[in-house]
Amino acid sequence: MTLVDTGRAKPADEKYAIGPYNLTRSQINQMINGGGLRRQTFTYSLEDTTAVATAYTDGDNLVELGAIDVLDLLSDQVGDYAPTKILIKSAYINVQTIAGQALSAHLRISATSGTLTNVALTSGTEVVGAGATYINETGGNLTLTETDLDLQVAALLVHKPGISFAIAKKYLYLCTTTAINADITAGRGTVTIEYVVI
């Protein structure tokens, strides 16, 4: 459901009085849709990786992608909605330029930002890759184990993890699964996630 104006055009930031609250059109739509499905795209470049000098091992950070946007549009006005979880429904990894070496990877989330390349995450949880247990959307508690991300094949990789985790773990990382001690600096691509903040 989406709020639609049938009269004069109104600015997006115009407030509407709903009970004791003054909300923008965007905030009302967010409330009606219960947070809604969000999409966020990150780019990655392996240009700053250091695998030639020092070998990477399974779970080491290749690159920090960024923070998942968990902004609660209603918290300033309503105050009752306090999201506690992030649910990743889908992940689309577009490997645009291959790494130059056989390289399998996965996505991890962490409560900590700023982990350097070639360092293991201290609070990381795998959410996309062979080490993550995906939740099957078609039936109860059935689970599936997925595959890692092949960064040596230029392709669009589609994953449907259905995994939820605490909202504090909002920092997304691309990590290696392959132990690698060779030049992978050519790798480039994008990661798009579809998720819900609940």
Image (cartoon, grey):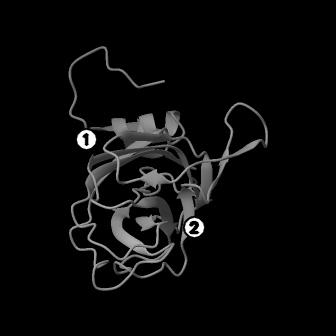
Observer able to see residue 185: yes
Task: Decide: is 89 above or below 183.
Answer: above
Task: Give the labeled residue for mark 2.
Answer: 125
Residue 140 x, y percent position in the rendering: 79, 38
Residue indicated by mark 1: 13
Q: Amino acid at mark 1?
A: Asp
Q: Is residue 178 above or below residue 115?
A: above
Tell whether 113 sits left or right of 19.
Answer: left
- How many callouts does the rendering have? 2
Residue 103 horizontal side relative to residue 126, left or right: left
Q: Is residue 152 left or right of residue 110?
A: left
Give the residue at the far top of this rendering.
6
Vertical placement of 192 versus 107: above or below? above
Q: Looking at the picture, tell me which residue is in the foreground, 137 or 27.
A: 137
Q: Which picture quadrant has residue 136?
A: top right
Nearer to us in this view, 121 or 7: 121
**Can you name the residue that lies furthest to the bottom here?**
54
Q: Amino acid at mark 2?
A: Thr
State which quadrant residue 114 falls in: bottom left
Could you say where residue 144 lies in the image, as x and y percent from the top left?
69, 45
Residue 152 location (% of width, % of height):
34, 53
Query: What residue is at 26 percent from the left and 71 percent from the top?
Result: 183
